[in-house]
Image (cartoon, rainbow, N blue to C red):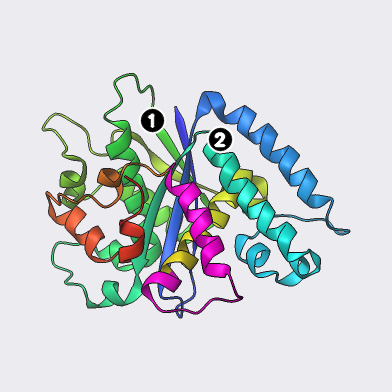
């Protein structure tokens, strides 16, 4: 059994892309990870006089709201520590990204109607990556549960997509004739408030890091402060070591319509990460 904790960054219409990250964890290793995150969070909480409900990656890195009172070097170290920690725990990361302009311009023939929404397209892409990666594991037991940050309306629609996956997605993972569609994914999604799940908060931080990387590399967005780009690149280098294989994310050999479509709407800089 595996659990994939998912969150996104870039929900505002003026953000050039939406980035979604899933932290994929084997259930038998989950308790240790939860315990360690609780210890990390307690250390971070000690920096604040008031109760800290959740991390909020963008506020941490940009020093906004209550994070404004925390020394910038401390904030940088916290983000870097969490990147190193997830790499040390050897959990995998699924990564999806939707370039809003590419999505608007793209031909829609054959693309499921629901995928015209960035969040739903990203969520389905995460599920397809996990399916493609896990079905190759000979000793894989059980399925993967997808847990998203609280988005009840769209999570319900995504659950419908996973319950009855469109035939259009079959080629993404080379579905066999006798194979059930998305047979590695539990056919519903779960929503949870981010402050109830530490790994959703971690996914939020990582999604923001990858989004800033794409914004500066692909969309010409300037640094928020001198040295930001170098720091983000350092974080991304660490996280890239734990990404699911590129053949699962944005395969170079696009053997079907669905993989070609997801490739066509992704920021180029993120597609080139990892192996």
Q: Look at the numbered disc 1 and give the secondary structure of its residue.
A: loop
Packing grade of label 1 (10 A; few <14, some 14-19, many >=20) is: some
> Residue 243, relative to residue 59: is it above or below?
above
- Distance of label 1 from label 2 (alpha carbons): 24 Å
Per the rendered image, the range of residues in magenta is 215-242
Q: Residue 99: where, in percent of width, then height?
A: 34, 70
The image quadrant that residue 275 belongs to is top left
Q: Height in image: 257 above or below 189? A: below
Please indicate whether residue 127 sits to the left or right of residue 230 in the image.
left
Secondary structure under the numbered disc 2 in the rendered image: helix
Viewer-closest of 152 and 247: 247
Residue at the spot 37% in from the left edge and 56% down from the top edge: 96
Is residue 212 in the magenta section?
no
- Residue toward you, 241 or 133: 241
- Where does the image place residue 198, in percent across and percent down from the top left? 64, 45
Q: Main secondary structure of the magenta part?
A: helix
| 232 lies left or right of 144 | right
Which residue lies at the image location 51% right of the left edge and 28% below the top edge? 27
Residue 237's x, y, as percent? Answer: 46, 51
Which comes before the other along the chain, label 1 or label 2?
Answer: 2
Please report the residue visible at 75 percent of the width from the left and 38 percent of the height from the top.
Answer: 39
Badge 1 is on which residue?
Answer: 143
Residue carrying label 2: 88
Residue 55 in view (yes/no): no
| Residue 223 appears in the figure | yes
Q: Is residue 221 magenta?
A: yes
Taking the spot 16% from the left edge, 39% from the top edge, the residue there is 174
Q: Is 70 left, or right, of 152 in this rendering? A: right
Across the whole image, how many numbered discs are drawn on residues?
Answer: 2
User: Which quadrant is the N terminus positioned in?
Assistant: top left
């Amino acid at each position: 059994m595996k659990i994939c904790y998912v969150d996104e960054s870039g929900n505002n219409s003026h953000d050039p892309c939406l980035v979604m990250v899933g932290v994929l964890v084997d259930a038998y290793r989950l308790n240790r990870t939860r315990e360690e995150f609780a210890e990390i969070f307690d250390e971070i909480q000690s920096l604040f006089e008031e109760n800290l409900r959740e991390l909020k990656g963008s506020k941490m890195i940009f020093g906004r709201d209550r994070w404004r009172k925390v020394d910038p070097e401390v904030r940088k170290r916290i983000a870097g520590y969490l990147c190193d920690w997830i790499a040390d725990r050897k959990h995998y990361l699924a990564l999806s990204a939707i370039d809003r302009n590419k999505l608007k311009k793209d031909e829609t023939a054959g693309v499921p109607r629901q995928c015209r929404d960035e969040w739903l397209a990203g969520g389905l892409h995460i599920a397809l990556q996990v399916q493609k990666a896990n079905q190759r594991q000979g000793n894989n037991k059980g399925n993967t549960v997808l847990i998203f940050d609280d988005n009840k309306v769209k999570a319900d629609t995504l659950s419908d997509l996973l319950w009855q996956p469109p035939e259009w997605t079959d080629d993404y993972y080379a579905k066999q004739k006798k194979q059930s569609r998305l047979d590695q994914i539990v056919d519903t999604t779960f929503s949870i408030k981010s402050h109830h799940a530490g790994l959703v908060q971690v996914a939020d931080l990582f999604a923001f890091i990858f989004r800033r990387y794409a914004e500066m590399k692909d969309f010409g967005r300037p640094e928020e402060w001198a040295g930001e780009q170098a720091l983000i690149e350092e974080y991304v280098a660490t996280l890239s070591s734990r990404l699911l294989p590129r053949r699962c994310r944005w395969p170079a050999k696009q053997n079907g319509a669905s993989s070609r479509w997801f490739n066509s709407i992704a920021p180029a800089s993120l597609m080139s990460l990892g192996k």
